Amino acid sequence: MAKVLALVVFGLAVASALPYNPVIRKLDEGLRYQYVQGPDGLHLVDLWGTVSDIAEAARYNPDRQNVYHLFTRQNPTVSQPLLMGSDGLLGITNYNPNRRTILLIHGWLDSVTADFNTVLVPAFLSAEDVNVIVVDWSAGAGSINYFTALANTAPSGESVARFINWLNAATGAVPTMYHLVGHSLGGHQVGIAGRNVAGSIAYITALDPALPGWTGQNNDKFRSSDGGYTEVIHTNAGFLGYMATLGDADFYPNGGINMPGCNSNDCDHSRSFHYMGESLVSGGFTGKRCASYITAMTGNCQLWGTLRMGGLVPKTGQSGIYYLETNSSPPFSRG
């Protein structure tokens, strides 16, 4: 009896010494563990949030840690820093409130050097004399723990909105001069930023906004009402990217999955910003109207009407679901 009691006491002591890290939030109704794309490949991630996940996210302060990089035609390759609240620093940069401002937000495990930025910064500057501001929120997106990065997405978007409000107050710029573009987690974050800005952002583009963690109970996902005109380009729908419609206009190139020339979800996911970049400098992507995203994914679209995908100018007042086909290599547009 004494031996049994000793074993029970020992077992309780071992159990009490183990870390207690209960699950406190489940983001999706589906599988707990899912694959999510990072810049270095696929990662199996846990979509159930624990106490330690929330504690890690709570240490992120986007007002202090987000970094804003300004690129213009005067400095197309070396950025100038912008610091929220620092009017003096702003005054010695090439920022011009009379130009349109493009604001880019990257995805998970990325930074200012992300392929998303290296493709779109030169494309925008080639197409028009604009201010391009790259948001580096790697302090929030850089955790290998996907749940933590996901939890940091909304606070970062709200902070980006405060940055835009400060910039407009300091310079006299207005929301109708903005185009926000985000990829993956950034695809939802641009919507969060847009809905928190004082006034209505003219044009918001979500490039294959992330799927894992954005269904079910997550109400922060991209919305059609986040800007004056909202557009979504789906290139890995149902895997890494969101499947259903989210914007005023939703485009499903090649059915939104299995991009020509790609052999991985990662490649599909990235095609969204390559298509966007090409649309800025040469146009050519024209979608055919579809009855639903299901018919768009099958290419069975019989409705009248077309709409250009991407580009510099918001198609304000236009809406719908569209299908188009692309080439397997640049130029991706078929004209």
Image (cartoon, rainbow, N blue to C red):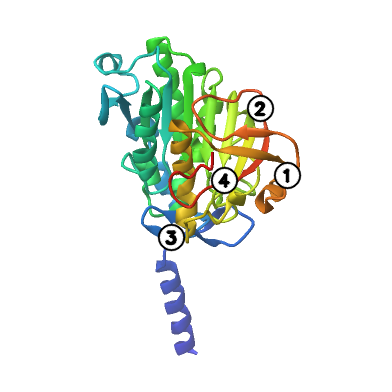
Q: Depth-wise, is mark 1 or mark 3 nearer the camera?
A: 1
Mark 1–mark 2 distance (CA, rounded to whole Å): 16 Å
Position of the C terminus by quadrant: top right
Q: Nearer the viewer, residue 226 or 121?
A: 121
- Write down the residue under mark 3: 42
- Write down the residue under mark 1: 292
- Write down the residue under mark 4: 234
Can you say whether 60 is above or below 146 in the image?
A: above
Kind of element beneath mark 4: loop
Q: Nearer the viewer, residue 104 or 331?
A: 331
Amino acid at dot 2 = Gln
Kind of element beneath mark 3: strand
Mark 1–mark 4 distance (CA, rounded to whole Å): 14 Å
**94 on left or right of 45:** left
Q: Earlier in the sequence, mark 1 or mark 4?
A: 4
Amino acid at dot 1 = Ser
Q: Badge 1 local density, few (<14 within 10 Å), some, or many (20+)?
A: some
Amino acid at dot 3 = Leu
